[in-house]
Amino acid sequence: MGVFEELKSRGFCFQGTDEAELRKLLNDKKGVRFYVGFDPTGSSLHVGHLLPVMAMRLLQRAGHVPIVLVGGATARIGDPSGKLTARPMMTIEEINANAESLKRQLSRFIKVENNSAFFVNNADWLCKIGYIDMLREVGTIFSVNRMLTQESVKMRLENGLSFLEFNYSILQAYDFWTLHKELGCELQMGGQDQWGNMVAGTELVRRKCGDTVQAMTIPLLLDANGKKFGKTAGGKNVWLDVNRTSIFDYYQFWRNCDDSQVAKLMRYFTTLPLNEIDLLVDKNINRAKEILAAEATALAHGEAAAKEAFAAAGTRFGFADPELKLATTSFIGKVSPAQADVPELAIDAAEFAAAPEGKILVSRLLVLCGFCKSNSDGRRLIQGNAVSLDDVKVADPTTALGAADLASAPILRAGKKNFRRLKVK
């Protein structure tokens, strides 16, 4: 199977400029440079942003070269695609800080060694060209009549579209032209709502230098309720930033996905062979969910963090395949429940009886767990927002627990890697 066929079979292809040429480009040519853009409208990506990232990873594994574009300039304009109203304007300082944050997050997914990928910011060229120069260079190429037919424009005309946002398509097209000219970029990928902007880019390249380049969109990912994928049951975004979504909650988001979504999500967010995915879903849907959650968490936060989340969730809620009967190529297939057991701290009931009001300070419990050397160190950990009990932050350094509080065997955590299950012996 060529990489283009794999993209299609995994569901990444929604629309393309020329399927035959895309197939030839990606299957027959080595080291094709392609780009995907991300506007830094926030300080973190959420899981709804990850579909094009996974497509980039798949192409990079096939030997092609991703160009990751962070839109430090276009974020100042605002993309009207898929939006009913204009985005709030951000300061330049906010945009620059967000751009650096997104670059760090995306570098977890895309390998950058030995020029295997490029990270660029369109502020490096768009912010240096004058308005009159831009109009003279590309203004005659874009037809207003044609721009008005773009879905991203049409759906906003009823609610109002500013001239500022109307220019977004031209700027995105100019990005493609610049990347083609400077880096030899031959393909742009993005969400299906970007189609009009992407086609504008292919046309600009053709008109400027006569070259043919390609564009391919990725389908909009919806959850089982037909809403945009990437939100919890409570409607909150699931972020890659651990300060906004804990690693355990990130794991549980994937682990709790709807049964009807599992096969699709595994095709998108794991590299497991397609026949293995079908077998796992058919034989043990909950084991498939565990593997999906572990693989997705490992991508965002590393295998060690994924194993810890797998251990904590399995110990609390049960393991789907405790005897490892179902074969898998996933790394989590080598982690048995015995290996995954959360370490315990059993506290003598006499200690509670001797403590004031029968309760032991959490700062003291941190010392007993070996997470710090003194109660004062424990209080500093709590004040630093680094301590949680069953993934609920402990905010008050005077918090104390009694023997009854340990009846459910809660998990005490300090930082990302230290955790113990608390019990009374």
Image (cartoon, helix red, strand yellow):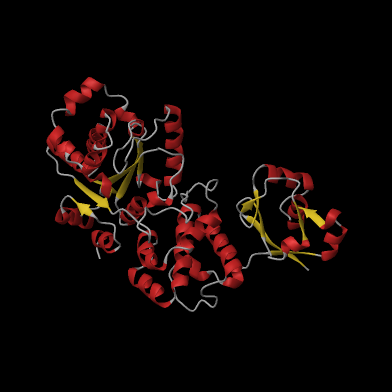
Q: How far across and down, in percent of the image, does residue 223 sit? A: 38, 58
Q: Quadrant of residue 9?
A: bottom left
Quarter where residue 95 is shown: top left
Q: Nearer the viewer, residue 266 or 185?
A: 266
Which quadrant holds the C terminus?
A: bottom right
- Location of residue 120 in the rendering, given as x and y in whole percent from the top left corner: 35, 37
Q: Is residue 201 left or right of residue 51?
A: left
Q: Position of residue 73 (x, y in %)?
A: 34, 31
Give 335 or 79, whichever is nearer the viewer.
79
The residue at the far right in this view is: 354
Residue 71 in the image: state x and y as whole percent: 35, 36
- Name the residue located 51 percent from the left edge and 73 percent from the top edge: 320
Q: Given the current orientation, which residue lies at the most extreme front position?
A: 158
The reply, left or right, for residue 78 in relation to residue 300 is left
Residue 280 placement: quadrant: bottom left
**Does residue 340 appear anywhere in the picture?**
no
- Evaluate whether residue 385 shows in this view: yes
The quarter of the picture where the N terminus appears is: bottom left
Question: Looking at this view, is 261 or 112 the one in front?
Answer: 261
Q: Is residue 188 above or below residue 255?
A: above
Instruction: Say above or below: 167 vs 102.
Output: above
| Labels in figure, total | 0
Residue at the image position 25 percent from the left and 28 percent from the top: 163
Answer left or right for 191 relative to 247.
Answer: left
